[in-house]
Amino acid sequence: MATEGLTIFGKTVFDTLFIDYRIMVIAAIISIILFIVGMYIQLEKWGRGIPEGATKPYGAWGALKMIISKIFEKGIGHALEVLILDVAFQRRTYRRRKLEWFMHILIFWGWIGLLILTIVAAAAEFAGPFLFNQDHTYFVGVWKSLELPNNIFGYMLVLGIIIAIARRLFSTGKDVQARNADIDWILILGLLIVVVTGFYAQALRGDVARNLIEAYPPGLFNNLTVMFHEVFTLLFCVAYLPFSKYFHMITAPLTILVNHGGE
Amino acid sequence: MAKEKPSINTVNFTAAQLMEFDACTRCGECVKYCPTYDARDKNQDIEPRDKIQKWKDFMNKSYGLKARLFGPEKIPPEEIKKFTDDLYNCTTCGMCGTVCPAGINTIELWESTRANLVKHGTGPYGKQSLFPKLIEEGHNPYLKQQKDRLAWMTPDIKIAEKSDIAYFIGCTAGYNQQVLGVSTARILNKLNVPFMALGEEEWCCGSALIRTGQQHINDTPKKAAIHNVEALKARGAKRVIFACAGCFRAAKIDWPRAYGKALPFEAIHMSQFLAEQLEAGKIKWEKSLDKTVTYHDPCHLGRHVGVFEEPRKVIKSMPGIKLVEMKRNRKEQRCCGAGGGVKAGIPDLALGVAKARMNDAKETGAEAVISTCPFCRRNLLDGRDDLKMDMRMDDLVVLTAHLMGLSTDVKPPAPGAPKESISDLFRTQTIPPKLAEPPKEAPKAEKK
């Protein structure tokens, strides 16, 4: 018996990951809409700038245009160099703060890696029935092949979070003990919830990979923790991003690019 | 009911700058290096991080999601005033931007925020508000006469009427630090480099107005920049030498913006010119000086423009001189404390930072501090005097002139002339004490 799932345009999306796809699709759509709205609000806020000599604000799209043109002001080659060295490998942090760099690289790449793998898995789940006319076994195959990188990125994220928590608990430096630093705890603990529930979900899914999918009956809430993990991750890491300190994941790289590496 | 208007506005900011407020990760790297935060006993209100956070909060209260849904949240005027005062407790040295992992261009950000607050009516700070009137009307911030621009000249100095090399003297060297004017001019004369100076035609570079966010007032710095550029062009200048780091920074960065295109001449700092002459074998040292010196990088020459090695190259070539570095040098130097309008507006803060820098110098075991900016020179002298430290402080051109066998003497100083008008390193002159003012007559008792 194949698992039942959401039927879209006559095709079935299988409930292979102990989640109910109806809820997942709704949560994903809401999260993406909130993310886009949040981004637009921020862009519109930046677009209110009226530089010396100008008579009217840029507007949201004007701001976007200005930011993009500034990024490529010194040519595509230079922008790529900054993107690789300063954004991907965070050269500016590495030069001064080795431990923080290590922590940040673990969190950054752990986060980005898991995001990319999640997108790949989601794409495979939809591509199976819609593009390749395959049943759920296609997706299970893809998902299994992603298990190792998923583990690596997950452990990177956990290690990064542990270092971040330890720094905040034990460092007395003025740089770490910032005013209003409580907000950092929300973000760190939020990520911790994402990874802990994520590992739990993966453990269950490992079971799926080892056994036949048919052995598991479908249901609205196949597993409450797994469902919580997926929905919480979407809301916390996607919908909440433009409204939280995690917004720096977008603004800091853009700022480095706009300022040509800050040099 | 009409929606409340936001308590702040977004004038003077580019879209990218408004984005920069959202890019701060509050990592606190800037806090470790901020000279004014240190001098203010680690007051969190003036941390660069805290200032960015504060303006970000103002922006979100005025234009964020909640503001869009329910209208802007009112920010009490005293909160904006407090923020303004904290913002001006900054020398715009740019150290925060240098160390910022997000690469935020803090120098421009502080200047734009200051300009916004001046327009808002809460900036600038203290005596800084006198700059626009002084510079607009008198073309210098010191209440001096234009006709006295070259009053420091001594009979031995030759300045050409027209030349492709110009020496832009600047207000501080021209009026208050004559030793820099005479030393620079004598060096150029000795090197057989004909040069001209604008004299009465020279206007303030405008730096003080731009740094304090007052550039829009009557467009004074723009007018001054265009005037200076056109005057130099008209006199045939192809290279313009600046011995003042502040003027040099203005010419390199601010003037082209005001002029709307690249300058029609090359702007070069005197330290670069000296290094060039040294390379060409034109400088002949005639004296030796057995001294250990340390070099203070002016923010405006170093971090702002990127000139770090040329002054060191010149110092290292000097006979007898041993150069030792302060722990914080080059890109990571500690500001002298005078910039960003702080010397005029918040003198006690300027002094606090200067003392910290002089202590940095003392740690090296050096006997003298050498710099390449008259403003740093003056403030570090103040710091030294306040600490009663046994340390000499002078400009690279003064040391260079002396070792080239030239006099660094200025016209006999007037009684009570500023201490910085003569050489501190060589002390061949003294400043006569200020003449006692005649006692004021006691006011007569009013008849009832």
Image (tube, coloured by chain):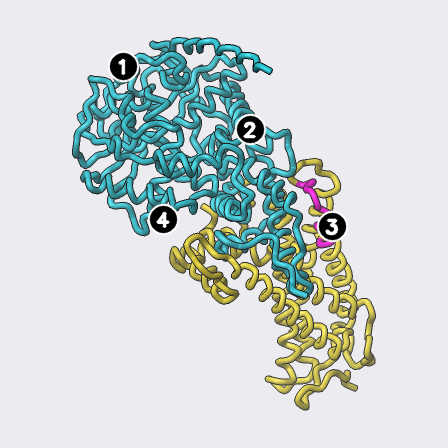
Chain colours: A yellow, B cyan
Q: Is residue B371 magenta?
A: no
In the image, is residue B364 above or below residue A210?
A: above
Q: Residue at x 78, y 70 (%)?
A: A227
Q: Is residue A182 magenta?
A: yes
Stretch of the chain drawn in magenta:
A176-187
Q: Chain of mark 2?
A: B
Amino acid marked by disc 3: Trp
Asked if badges 2 and 1 are on one and the same chain, I answer yes
Q: Which residue is mark 1?
A: B407
Q: Secondary structure at mark 4?
A: helix
Marks 4 and 2 sit apart, C-alpha to C-alpha, by 30 Å
Q: Residue at x 46, y 15 (%)?
A: B391
In the image, is residue B57 above or below residue B161?
A: below
Marks 1 and 4 sit apart, C-alpha to C-alpha, by 39 Å
Q: Chain of mark 1?
A: B
Q: Which residue is mark 3?
A: A185
Asked if badges 4 and 2 are on one and the same chain, I answer yes
Q: Which residue is mark 2?
A: B349
Residue A144 in the image: state x and y as whole percent: 68, 71
Q: Which mark is residue B257?
A: 4
Which one is closest to the eye, mark 1 or mark 3?
1
Q: Chain of mark 3?
A: A
Residue B405 in the image: state x and y as whole percent: 25, 15
Residue A248 in the image: state x and y as whole percent: 60, 55
Asked if badges 2 and 3 are on one and the same chain, I answer no
Residue B297 in the image: state x and y as whole percent: 43, 30
